[in-house]
Amino acid sequence: MPFPSPPRARSGPRRRSLLAAAPAALALAGCTAAGTEESADAGDGSSAAERRARARAARDSERLLQRYDAVIAARPALAGRLGPLRENVVRHAQAFGGGRKASPSGPASAAPPASASPPAAVPGNDKEALAGLAAAERELADRRSEDLLGVPGELARLLASAAAAGAAHVYLLTEGDA
């Protein structure tokens, strides 16, 4: 008497586990396109739409950087926790073509761009200040995830990497103490 064949078992990882691991892998990869020959070559032959998308991403990172600076200025006790995240945001702005530089002395030496809007008011306690930064990071990461669908290869990879890093920042800002 033959036995019924067992249900077909899938070999290898499932699609959901791969998709769940992708943001973490991208966050570990970081944004390294700034200063490389590839990014300089890609910028020379880029389309007007790609240049606009890159400029908007740089502006978005600079606005987020202003929020970090405002929170650090208003809540100095958070400077140690927010410093590394702020440095990542500076690198994102630079990778997209922004002009701000990271400063080891903190946010006071980095002047905001002349056309920048003032940052939002900082809430009165640490928890609310972190929640406000997390919300800004989440909104920007979501927007970048949507934007990457309409841009060519290298810029799409850069947007994906910045979005993944933003998602990691959200986690660190909301779950970092847990």
Image: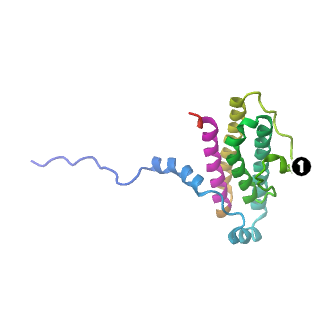
Residue type marked 1: Ser
Q: Residue at x 41, y 52 (%)?
A: 13
Q: Which residues are magenta?
A: 155-174
Q: Position of residue 54 (x, y in %)?
A: 75, 58
In the image, residue 36 lies in the stretch drawn in magenta: no
Question: In this figure, which residue is indicated by the disc labeled 1?
Answer: 115
Where residue 87 appears, as percent x and y from the top left, is 71, 51
- Residue 149 percent coordinates (x, y): 64, 54
Residue at 56% in and 50% down: 23
Q: How many discs appear? A: 1
The quarter in which the C terminus is drawn is top right
In the image as oriented, which residue stretches furthest toward the top? 124
Q: Residue 59 or 101: which is nearer the viewer?
A: 101
Say few, some or many: other residues with alpha carbon within 10 Å of mark 1 (under 14 / 14 to 19 / 20 or more): few
Q: Residue furthest left?
A: 1
Q: What SS does tag 1 mark? A: loop
138 or 75, which lies in front? 75
Residue in front for this viewpoint, 104 or 66: 104
What residue lies at 27% left-to-right and 46% top-to-bottom?
7
Residue 75, placed above or below residue 94: above
Residue 169 in the magenta stretch? The answer is yes
The residue sitting at the right extreme is 114
Per the picture, the main secondary structure of the magenta-coloured stretch is helix
The one of 120 and 4 positioned closer to us in this rendering: 120
